[in-house]
Image (cartoon, coloured by chain):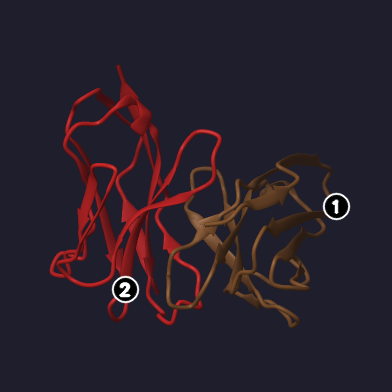
Amino acid sequence: GNSVTQMEGPVTLSEEAFLTINCTYTATGYPSLFWYVQYPGEGLQLLLKATKADDKGSNKGFEATYRKETTSFHLEKGSVQVSDSAVYFCALSDRGGGADGLTFGKGTHLIIQP
Amino acid sequence: SAVISQKPSRDICQRGTSLTIQCQVDSQVTMMFWYRQQPGQSLTLIATANQGSEATYESGFVIDKFPISRPNLTFSTLTVSNMSPEDSSIYLCSVKFDLTNEKLFFGSGTQLSVL
């Protein structure tokens, strides 16, 4: 079956540091890949997505590239801010047609210190 | 986007009782889903709420334990029946607005603790 594996948290960084949160997946076919973010006290919201190999999703300074050869979708940001502190979830959609839910990783808690 | 309201936001319940969680969207949506997020675990899809018919459950989840209703395009309920401490979790409603867009929108969740 489908699965998503994320690096364990919490990840603690200083402001302006470079961020990488690793995500790898197992899926049949050609999944779409997503990063969702949950800020403290709020619901999950889509951060970025990529729908095919070599696509790069980007939003709010975050980027992730769909790497089919390594089945990865690592999240990166060049200079993090305190406001980026949140829980980040990697997810995939494999069954297509838009009619199904997503498979999520366990989430990575990111803490940015001033 | 839309406003997705979930009620209650949290509850503490006794073993053996049932709790119904409501999800209300302020506009019509195509798909509605219910997820569970157990402590330290990923979000797990419980079921797809189908309008006017029985929900479609994922492996490991059954209707007797998690009955779901979806009477229209903006509202759904999830009931957690005959609760045990293992049901302590965050329950999340999520929606899709159309089948051409895989983006999910989430409610803020219901944090359930079972004593």
Identify the subunit bearing mark 1. B
Q: Quadrant of residue A66?
A: bottom left
Depicted A78 relative to depicted A57: above or below: above
Colour assigned to chain A in the rendering is red
- Name the residue located 62 percent from the left edge and 70 percent from the top edge: B47
**Does the rendering let one see residue B115?**
no
Helix, strand or loop status at disc 1: loop
Q: Quadrant of the N terminus of chain A?
A: bottom left
**Which image quadrant is residue A110 in?**
top left
Q: Are marks 2 and 1 on the same chain?
A: no
Amino acid carrying mark 1 in the image: Gly
Q: Which residue extends farthest top?
A: A114
Dot 2, how many residues are within 10 Å of its Cα: few (below 14), some (14-19), or many (20+)?
many
Residue A31, which numbered label? Answer: 2
Q: Which chain is brown?
A: B
The residues bearing labels 2 and 1 have C-alpha atoms spaced at a distance of: 40 Å
Q: Mark 1 and mark 2 in contact (Cβ < 8 Å)?
A: no
In this view, the residue in front, A18 or B27, is B27
For residue B16, the mark is 1
Tell me residue A98's x, y (percent): 45, 77
Hey, which residue is sitting farthest right in the picture?
Answer: B17
Residue B78 in percent (x, y) is at 74, 62
Q: Position of residue A60 (x, y in %)?
A: 29, 43
Question: What residue type is disc 2 on?
Answer: Pro
